Structure formats: structure tokens, C-alpha cells
Image: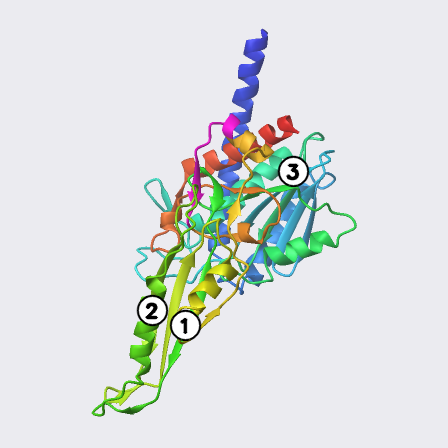
Amino acid sequence: MTSISKIKKSEDTVLSDIGILSEKALDLLRQIVAIPAPSSHESKRCQFLYKWVKKFLKESALSHKASCSRSGNNILLYAPRGGKKSLLMCAHMDTVPPCLGYSTQPFSLTRKGDRYIGLGSNDDGASIVCMLMAFSKAAGSDKGCGLLLSLTSQEETGGEGGLQMVLDNLKNSQSLPYPDFALVGEPTGMKAAIAERGLLVLDGEATGSSSHASEDNPDNAIYKAMADIKAITSTRFGKVSEMMGPVHLAVTQINAGKVHNMVPDQCRYVVDIRPNDRYTNLEIWQKLQARIQGTLTPRRLDHKVSVTPGNHLLMKAVKSLNIKTYVSATSSDWSKLDIPAVKIGPGDSSRSHSADEYITEKEIYTGIKNYLAIIKAIDNGI
């Protein structure tokens, strides 16, 4: 057999293996979707996944090459593979609550044409099953970077009991390495997000004094809030990012008043801000607070902007595979990482949190294939 024929046979075997893994991935996705897991209530889904992974490693003869542990509602797999550096792959098991408008049962993976519809199928079940299959395939090798796979909770609500717990445990671990870089699994169409805007949510409040609506009361909390909102929305942030553009800001909620004939003494509103890499969340908050009479209270300040260094190994791996890159406007667990990362996964962000959320079999296949290709490219670059 010629060397070319050997290469072709090897490629055919790999593609066949990926096809088998895709079938397993879809079967697992069916079982995952059937277990409701709203953010901060993932215990049943986590327990199922933990048992499934332990059994899968045993049946795949990987128990002696990979370990599996659980902390809170998070699962962590580790395969040393002999490497001095370690790659973390992470995806979240929690979902938002089902919205109205589903044409199918949200907690059942239902096939319609080439679509598999179900809550969390796209965000983030597809990344979970694809990363699991890629991990199982790559973990069999004794050469390459160490592989960590974290299936986490509380991503949708930004809780500290999710990826942050996993990272804290790794920092204190005597037996597991802290990762050097990461792949964050989110529905990106298998394009690589090389940067991600931060997120800053401010709760605004204006206070005044109540009175009967028939009286001329300039101390109306709504009027004060309107003035503050105008000051906020007219604020300009002069530092424009070459990569991300300007800071984006929008007032998304407002609430005041109890009855029609009473001037309210309190008006509350919410400001959603997507920072660029030229400002910290603290700087933005302080600048806006200085411009208004009322108060702005940040829900949290740690959803920072994330950017992959241009010369990093991850960037080289992405470029070597001709994977399209972009800047993501949505936040994810990437903001919790203190290591270089890219965000990449099967599916499409536009389907997330919407009725009839879906994934396709082709996207599952491509997800497994491309994750394996990225791992190989990283191994070759180390």
C-alpha cells in the first residue's frame, strides 16, 4: 500500500469514527434535554451526566487514562497525555427557562427535518456533547497537551458555583494542573471568537417625594429619572477600540408608580452596557455616576472584556485551520478565565433563549471534527 493510500485510509477511519461519535452525541443530547436544568437548579442533570461520563469512560477503556470528578454541580475530566501544558475545554449544562412559542415539548429533543429542537440543544448542549466526544477520542493518546474538560453550572446567571468554583478548586489542587489556555464552548457556528465584550448591568434609582397628581410637584421621581437617563445616554466614551468599536449602552427597563393619581417618590431603571477593551467596568460606572443626581448600583464588576493575544498558540492553531474569527457581543464563562482562550462551538447564538431552539446533525459532526482538529493543531504547536 502506498503512503498516499495509507493516509487516505487513515482519514477515512477518522471520519468514520467521528460519525459514530456523532450518533452517540445525539443520543446523549436527547437524554440531557429531557432533564430540566434552569440555572442554579442543575443537580439532576449534573448527577445524570456524572454517572454517564463514568460509565462512558469505562466502556471506552479510558478509565485508566482519564479521571472524572464532581464538585457542586460541576463535572471535571482530566487526561494527562504526557504534556507539560494543559488545555481546558468548558461548556455549561444550565439553561434559561423555556419561553413561550415552542411548537414542540421544550424538554424533548424533537426532530423536524434536519433540526433537533429542544431547550438547551443549541445553548449549550451541543458544545457539551461535542466536547465530550472530542475529549474521549483525544484522551486515548499518550502524547499531546493535557486535557481538562469542565461541564459547568450557573453560566446563565453568572453564579460563583459554576466555572469559578472549578477554577478555584484547580488552583488549590495537588493532583490536577491549572490550565494554560482554554476553549469555551458556546454556539458560534464553529467560528472562533477571539475577543468578547464585557458586560456591566447597572440598577439606577431616582428618588423624589410623593403627592397627589393634581398638585404641581417638580420632585417627581419619574422626571428625575428621565433627566438622569438623558445624561446617561448622552455620555460619550471617547476611547474607541480598533477591535470592538465604541462602548455600547442601552436602558432596558424602567418601573415607577403605583396608581394613576399619585406622583411617585421612586423610579428604578436598568442600564445594559457592553464595554470595549479600552475601559474597565469600574471606570464606566464611575463616569456615569458622576453625571447623574440619582444612584447607579452595579450588579457585578467582574464580567470583564476578554481578548486572545494575537501571537498566542491558540491564534496560531485557529489560523492554521482557516477558521473564521470574529469579536463576540455576548458574554460567557470566558470572563471568569485568567488564561488565554477562544470561544467556539456548534450552533448559532441567534437561536439561544428563543422558541424552537435547535441544532443539526451536521453541526454536531462538524463540532466534534473541528474540536479534534484544534486539539491536534495545539499539540503540533507545543
User: In front: mark 1 or mark 2?
Assistant: 2
Q: Nearer the viewer, residue 108 or 143?
A: 143
Where does the magenta region start and end? 319-329
Q: Nearer the viewer, residue 291 or 296?
A: 291
Element assignment for label 3: loop
Q: Position of residue 319 (x, y in %)?
A: 50, 29
State which quarter of the image contains the N terminus.
top right
Q: Is 250 placed left or right of 166 in the picture?
A: left
Q: Residue at x 43, y 51 (%)?
A: 330
Q: In this figure, which residue is indicated by the disc labeled 2?
A: 229
> From mark 1 to mark 3, how far is it between C-alphas?
54 Å
Q: Nearer the viewer, residue 334 or 129?
A: 334
N-terminal-most mark, 3 or 2: 3
> Which amino acid, by three-letter code, is at mark 1?
Gly
Above or below, comparing residue 181 to residue 204 in the picture = above
Above or below, comparing residue 269 to residue 198 in the picture = below
Q: Can the viewer see residue 26?
A: no
Q: In this figure, which residue is indicated by the disc labeled 3?
A: 60
> Which amino acid, by three-letter code, is at mark 2?
Ile
N-terminal-most mark, 1 or 2: 1
Whether residues under marks 1 and 2 lie with C-beta atoms below 8 angstroms apart, the answer is yes
Q: Which residue is farthest right?
A: 174
Above or below, comparing residue 23 to residue 117 in the picture = above
State which quarter of the image contains the C terminus.
top right
Residue 107 counted in the magenta span: no
Q: Position of residue 120 (x, y in %)?
A: 44, 53
> From mark 1 to mark 2, how far is it between C-alphas?
9 Å
Q: Position of residue 325 (x, y in %)?
A: 45, 36
> Which amino acid, by three-letter code, is at mark 3?
Ser
Q: In this figure, which residue is indicated by the disc labeled 1?
A: 204
